Image (tube, rainbow, N blue to C red):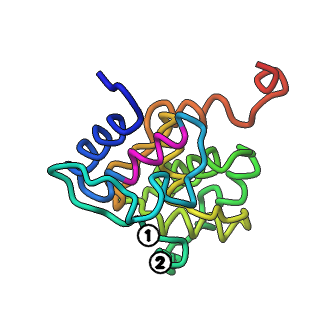
């Protein structure tokens, strides 16, 4: 049983140190989303010198905003979003009218898999769709995909093979565009 904040931090640290960095990022994104908190811009434990050392753990200095490496995404050049004989991405988006960043991500991936029959969808594919339909790019597209995953619409376990779940399919096929009646729920 957790008795205080320090004990909670110790338990969280022990749990997170046992999983790989990508999984750790997904867990932290889920925590921020679940508890509706913003990511801290400072270390909650204060300066490095004040930080208590927990026996059996490594001292980890969090990266600062300036120390983070930025992910530079590139468009998939050979992706034809206006195929002959099939609905174009623009037509599909106009039909579904997704409103949130998460809905847009699901619609993009649904289109890529269901209409274009892309076998393995990556974040670059989603980035290409966002750029093509002129949607505002989220500050962190990967995080937006994980949030859609937290909502049960996407399976983002493999970043090189993002999938739409059955809940995501239901969203696109039966709930988009959102009707005025659904918005009032």
Name the residue at 36% across, 41% down. Answer: 9
Dot 2, how many residues are within 10 Å of its Cα: few (below 14), some (14-19), or many (20+)?
A: few
Q: Nearer the viewer, residue 146 or 74?
A: 146
The percent position of residue 55, horizontal first and vertical second, equals: 17, 49
The vertical placement of 122 against 6, above or below, is: below
User: Which residue is disc 2 drawn over?
Assistant: 67
Q: Is residue 94 above or below residue 166?
A: below
Where does label 1 land, which residue? 63
Q: Residue 127, how many percent across, how many down?
A: 56, 67
In the image, what residue occupies the spot 33% across and 51% down? Answer: 24
- Residue 71 included in the magenta stretch of the image: no
SS class, disc 1: loop
Question: Residue 35: percent from the left, percent from the top?
Answer: 55, 34
At a point 59% along the width and 33% down the height, the residue shown is: 171
Name the residue rendered at 48%, 69% in the picture.
Answer: 124
Q: Is residue 67 left or right of residue 55?
A: right
Please say if the residues under marks 2 and 1 sit with CB atoms less than 8 Å apart: yes
**Which quadrant holds the C terminus?**
top right
Q: Which residues are magenta?
A: 25-33
Q: Residue furthest right?
A: 180
Q: Nearer the viewer, residue 119 or 142?
A: 142
Number of other residues with Cα within 10 Å of mark 1, as a class: few under 14, some 14 to 19, many 20 or more: few
Percent coordinates x, y for residue 97 in the rendering: 75, 45
Q: Which mark is residue 2?
A: none
Label 2 to label 1, Cα distance in Å? 6 Å
Q: Is residue 89 left or right of residue 52?
A: right
* Residue 28 on the magenta segment: yes
């Amino acid at each position: 049983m957790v008795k205080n904040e320090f004990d909670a931090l110790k338990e969280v640290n022990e749990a997170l140190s046992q999983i790989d960095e990508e999984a750790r990022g997904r867990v932290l994104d889920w925590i921020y989303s679940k508890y509706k908190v913003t990511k801290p811009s400072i270390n909650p434990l204060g300066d490095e010198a004040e930080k208590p050392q927990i026996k059996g753990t490594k001292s980890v200095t969090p990266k600062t905003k300036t120390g983070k490496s930025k992910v530079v995404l590139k468009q998939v050049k050979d992706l034809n979003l206006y195929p002959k004989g099939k609905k174009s991405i623009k037509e599909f988006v106009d039909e579904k009218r997704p409103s949130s960043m998460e809905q847009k991500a699901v619609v993009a991936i649904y289109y890529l898999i269901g209409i274009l029959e892309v076998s393995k969808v990556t974040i670059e594919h989603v980035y290409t769709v966002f750029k093509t339909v002129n949607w505002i790019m989220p500050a962190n597209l990967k995080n937006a995909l994980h949030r859609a995953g937290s909502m049960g619409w996407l399976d983002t376990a493999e970043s090189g093979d993002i999938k739409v779940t059955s809940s995501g399919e239901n969203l696109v096929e039966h709930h988009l565009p959102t009707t005025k009646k659904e918005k009032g729920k």
